Image (tube, helix red, strand yellow):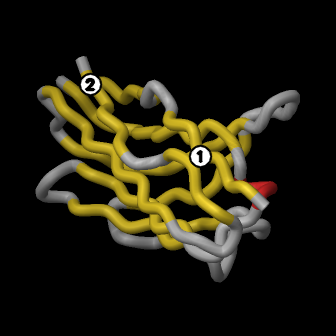
Amino acid sequence: QVQLVESGGGLVQAGGSQRLSCAAHGRIFSINVMGWYRQAPGKQRELVARINKDGSTNYADSVKGRFTISRDNAKNTVYLQMDSLKPEDTAVYYCNVKSLVFGLRREDWGQGTQVTVSS
């Protein structure tokens, strides 16, 4: 079993910054992809950013140049540095991890953390 523990989030003014972190715990053999998704009220969950094991990254167009994803493989932790936040970034942010456990591929989600950007 894999447990994802998220931290960070909260209320911030437009133009401000926040940092989210997500640590994966369990008997994990390897983690392939770590990422962050978000879901705003009335909208579908969408990819924000993801980072592969080799460090390659993908970002949603809406956050390019403002958000930075990184990971610490030794700690099985992924970070999302969010700068120049906008009110439209307000959403619940979910950590997503694709891993290999006892030879089986699995995908896990964090519990979600609220990010609210005030104008």
Does residue 36 sit above or below 53 in this rendering? above
Which numbered marker is on residue 2? 2
Pointer 2 local density, CA inside 10 Å: few below 14, some 14–19, many at least 20: some
Q: Nearer the viewer, residue 54 or 4?
A: 4
Q: Amino acid at mark 1?
A: Val
* Earlier sequence position, callout 2 versus callout 1: 2
Which x, y percent locates residue 40? 76, 37
Q: Residue at x 47, y 39 (%)?
A: 96
Q: Amino acid at mark 2?
A: Val
Element on which disc 1 rests: strand
Residue 20 lies, with reference to residue 17, above or below; the image says above
Instruction: Please give the name of the residue rendered at 38% of the width and 71% of the height, measured from the top-left corner.
Output: 55
In whole angstroms, how far apart are the C-alphas of marks 2 and 1? 24 Å
Q: Is residue 37 left or right of residue 118?
A: left
Tell me which corner region of the image, top left, top right, bottom left or bottom right, holds residue 62: bottom right
Question: Which residue is at the far right?
Answer: 42
Q: Which residue is at a point 78% across and 61% down the rendered structure image?
A: 119
Q: Which residue is mark 1?
A: 115
